[in-house]
């Protein structure tokens, strides 16, 4: 750590951004394959239209997409712009974390959390599920990392609160929120503790109200096809990671 900290910050930032793009590229593979229950390691990346394997030089995040002008080299079909978009978003969110936390233990955990949030957001929007492959390891990691950074009592209380509260909400709301959301909030609670778990629930509910109203009033959607809860939880988690301490302090001071 000491040695890395002597490197110029712009150099670290650029390296992390490129690293973020490749994590985003891996997230893309997960987003496509996890809902189909396919391995994310084998086979190597292939075109989703013609199944031709993608050449290593055509598999460079963002750059290959630009060079190929968004078309498969083999079948000439369009490659979705979602791929480079997700790579760039992942890299930016990762970089923001570096500027917030520096090269600390919290940042190391953050590096693992970011792709999970990206995958959950995209998969939930596309398939209305939050995969267990993400939430269950997240629960375990949350309890380990949480115990180290906030103490095991708080970590376990965050986990319990997540389970309890969301179970209650699910019972009362008959639909809208699913088991995946409960597992997610329990995992997030284990990472951040019970106070911030409450904050995540609160922020996502507020976001959900605004986004839901917008979709029903402006986009004329019915209550059935408005945005799922996963992306809101992911955004609320990021807000909490970045500004949770401040928001909780403001809340306590203004009680
Ligand atoms: Zn193709």
Image (spheres, grey):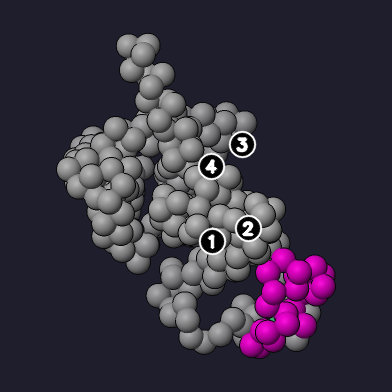
In the picture, the disc for residue 3 is 1
| Residue 100 percent coordinates (x, y) | 53, 42
Q: Quadrant of residue 44?
A: bottom right
Residue at mark 2 to residue at mark 1: CA–CA distance: 7 Å
Residue 117 visible to the viewer: no
Marked residue nearer the N-terminal end (3 or 1): 1
* Camera-side residue of 204 and 148: 148
Q: Residue at x 68, y 69 (%)?
A: 61
Residue 176 visible to the viewer: yes
Q: Residue at x 80, y 74 (%)?
A: 68
| Local crowd size for mark 3, using a 10 Å CA cut-off: few (<14), some (14–19), many (≥20) | few
Q: Is the C-beta separation of discs 4 and 3 under 8 Å? A: no
Q: Is the C-beta separation of discs 2 and 4 under 8 Å? A: no
| Residue 155 percent coordinates (x, y) | 24, 45
| Residue that badge 4 annotates | 100
Q: Residue at x 26, y 37 (%)?
A: 194
* Camera-side residue of 2 and 152: 2
Q: Secondary structure at mark 2?
A: loop
| Residue that badge 2 annotates | 7
Q: Secondary structure at mark 4?
A: helix
Residue at mark 1 to residue at mark 4: CA–CA distance: 20 Å
Q: Indicate yes or no whether the magenta region holds residue 101.
A: no
Q: Nearer the viewer, mark 3 or mark 1?
A: 1
Residue stretch in magenta: 52-73
**Figure quadrant of the C terminus:** top left
């Amino acid at each position: 750590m000491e040695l890395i900290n002597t490197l110029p910050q712009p150099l670290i930032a650029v390296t992390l951004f490129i690293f973020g793009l490749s994590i985003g590229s891996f997230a893309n593979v997960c987003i496509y394959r996890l809902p189909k229950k396919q391995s994310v390691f084998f086979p190597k990346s292939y075109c989703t239209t013609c199944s031709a394997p993608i050449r290593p030089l055509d598999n460079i995040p963002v750059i290959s997409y630009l060079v190929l002008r968004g078309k498969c080299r083999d079948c000439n079909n369009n490659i979705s712009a979602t791929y480079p978009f997700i790579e760039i978003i992942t890299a930016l969110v990762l970089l923001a974390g570096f500027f917030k936390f520096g090269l600390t233990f919290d940042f190391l955990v953050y590096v693992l959390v970011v792709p999970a949030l990206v995958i959950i957001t995209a998969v939930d929007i596309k398939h209305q599920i939050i995969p267990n492959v993400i939430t269950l390891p997240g629960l375990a990691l949350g309890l380990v990392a949480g115990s180290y950074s906030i103490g095991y009592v708080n970590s376990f209380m965050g986990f319990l609160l997540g389970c309890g509260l969301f179970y209650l909400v699910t019972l009362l709301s008959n639909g809208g929120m699913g088991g995946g959301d409960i597992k997610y909030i329990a995992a997030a609670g284990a990472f951040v503790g019970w106070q911030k778990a409450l904050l995540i629930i609160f922020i996502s509910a507020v976001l959900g109200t605004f986004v839901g109203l917008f979709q029903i009033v402006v986009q004329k959607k019915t209550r059935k096809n408005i945005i799922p809860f996963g992306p809101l939880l992911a955004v609320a988690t990021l807000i909490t990671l970045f500004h949770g301490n401040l928001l909780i302090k403001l809340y306590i001071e203004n009680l």
